Image: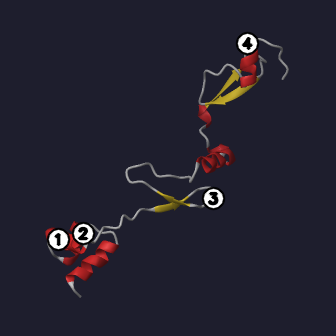
């Protein structure tokens, strides 16, 4: 087989100039020259994973964190259904300044109110009915 054809095959598999040169025992410059002349582009093969929730294929950007979910909707759905996997150390218990009920918050140890409703009533006045 001709050298050009061998280079074309390896290039289609996503190999770079140096790896092709090693495989075919030729110089990297020879491979580069042939690729430029023949307009052989390197295929940018990326790993495809699937979304943890819906199974949709995910494409990853090089140099970026690997995705686990295809969208915010799937990400939130997974966390809602897998709360047992959350770091329980991040939860803290508080007493609401308005209704005085005990509540827990996740990753916020400075919470004062159990809800937005209680915050508004306590801060701006009004009767409390929980």
Viewer-nearest of discs 3 and 1 = 1
Q: CA distance from mark 4 to mark 1?
A: 75 Å
Q: Residue at x 17, y 68 (%)?
A: 28
Which residue position holds label 1?
Answer: 33
Q: Tell me the SS state at disc 3.
A: loop
Whether the residues at callouts 1 and 2 have beta carbons within 8 Å, the answer is no
Furthest toward the bottom, the residue is: 1
Whether the residues at callouts 2 and 3 have beta carbons within 8 Å, the answer is no
Tell me residue 26's x, y (percent): 15, 75
Mark positioned earlier in the residue sequence (1 or 2): 2
Q: Tell me the SS state at disc 4.
A: helix
Mark positioned earlier in the residue sequence (4 or 1): 1
Q: Tell me the SS state at disc 2.
A: helix
Q: Within 10 angstroms of label 1, few (less than 14), some, or many (20 or more) residues?
A: few
Q: Within 10 angstroms of label 2, few (less than 14), some, or many (20 or more) residues?
A: some
Q: Tell me the SS state at disc 1.
A: helix
Viewer-nearest of discs 3 and 4 = 4
Q: As rendered, which of 49 and 35 lies closer to the eye?
A: 35
Q: Residue at x 59, y 38 (%)?
A: 87
Tell me residue 43's x, y (percent): 35, 67
Q: CA distance from mark 3 to mark 1?
A: 45 Å
Which residue position holds label 3?
Answer: 54
């Amino acid at each position: 087989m001709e050298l050009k054809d061998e280079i074309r095959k390896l290039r289609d598999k996503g190999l770079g100039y140096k790896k092709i040169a090693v495989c075919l025992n030729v110089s990297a410059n020879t491979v580069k020259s042939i690729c430029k002349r023949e307009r052989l582009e390197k295929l940018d093969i990326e790993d495809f994973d699937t979304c943890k929730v819906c199974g949709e294929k995910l494409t990853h950007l090089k140099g970026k964190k690997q995705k686990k979910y295809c969208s915010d909707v799937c990400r939130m759905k997974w966390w809602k259904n897998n709360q047992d996997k959350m770091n329980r150390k991040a939860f803290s218990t508080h007493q609401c300044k308005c209704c005085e009920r005990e509540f827990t918050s996740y990753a916020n140890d400075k919470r004062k109110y159990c809800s937005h409703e209680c915050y508004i009533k306590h801060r701006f006045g009004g009767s409390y009915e929980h």
